[in-house]
Image: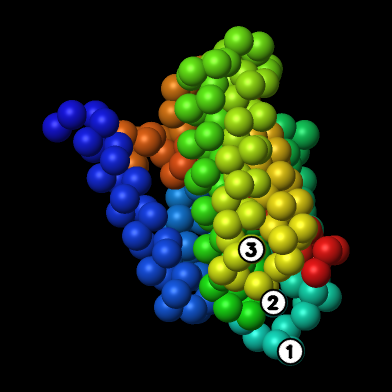
Amino acid sequence: MNELVTRTLTGAIYVGLTLGAAWAGPVTTSLLFLPVCLQAAYEMHRLSTHNCPQAAVLGPMLAAAVVYITVVLTGILPGFGVLPAMAVLFLVVFVAVVELLWRPGSAPALEIGPLLMVVCLVAVPFGLISLLMRNGPELFIGFMLLLWTNDTGAYLVGKAWGRTPLLPRTSPKKTIEGLVGGILLAMAIGLLLAQFWAVLSTREWLVAAAIVAITSTVGDLLESALKREAGVKDSGDLLPGHGGVLDRFDGFLLALPAMVLTVAVLH
């Protein structure tokens, strides 16, 4: 099958499942994203440890599952506040540190970093979806639309007019022109969303769009740096035409917490 067709079909299924789950509610969305989160955690740990043995990934994936479920509960259960979530997060990291210190042959200085990346840069952002959906699906769907249009705008503008490299040592194809194009297209979609969904004001949608575009670009660059350091082209091969789950959600991991914070501060 043609690679473009394969990529398009995979993307269409991903978009359809995401939007369908969002309209079904936060519980359905959280259940859908649990395996996505775990696969992303697996890929993140393998990248950041340069393809360590698979058995070494089990602990970080278990930590990711516990933290993900805990953060999800803060959005689904009204009585489950931030303090219990922070307590669980601390306990997970504490137990992991103790295990590293007591395990023969461990290298805490090398292993704690990948664990924290899995917990803080994968499990927490995915878990925050439920918090964004606490009052309905509009904010999460709007966020995903901003994310997708930024990617599209950055690609199209960068391909047509991109001349100035953004960070050549990490991602040679990304340009400043593409970054600006992505931000502007995301803000245009934000303006459109404000006409239909009053969950945010026009100003709030525009600010959110710009912040999502910028933070998702940084997330993309972070994953590119990890892949370059690990000497691989993709984080995995689970998604035909796209690579790994992390390749599809790299910008999401920084942009979603930024969206949650933006809404909390502005709204």
Q: Which residue sits at x=33%, y=42%?
A: 239
Viewer-proximal residue among 59 and 196 = 196
Kind of residue indicated by mark 1: Gly
Q: Position of residue 43 (x, y in %)?
A: 49, 40
Q: Earlier in the sequence, mark 2 or mark 3?
A: 2
In this picture, is 105 found above or below 162? below
Mark 2 touching mark 1, by CB under 8 A? Answer: no
Mark 2 secondary-structure assignment: helix
Residue 60 in the image: state x and y as whole percent.
59, 51
Residue linked to disc 3: 194
Q: If the image is split into quadrants, where does the C terminus sit?
A: bottom right
The residue that mark 2 highlights is 74
| Residue 44 in sight | no
Tell me how far mark 2 sits from mark 3, CA to CA. 27 Å
- The one nearer the camera, 262 or 163, is 163
Residue marked by disc 1 = 79
Residue 31 falls in which quadrant of the image?
Answer: bottom left
Residue 188 x %, y % = 61, 47
Using the numbered discs, state the Cα–Cα distance from disc 1 to disc 3 in whole angstroms. 31 Å
> Is residue 128 positioned above or below 53 on the image?
below
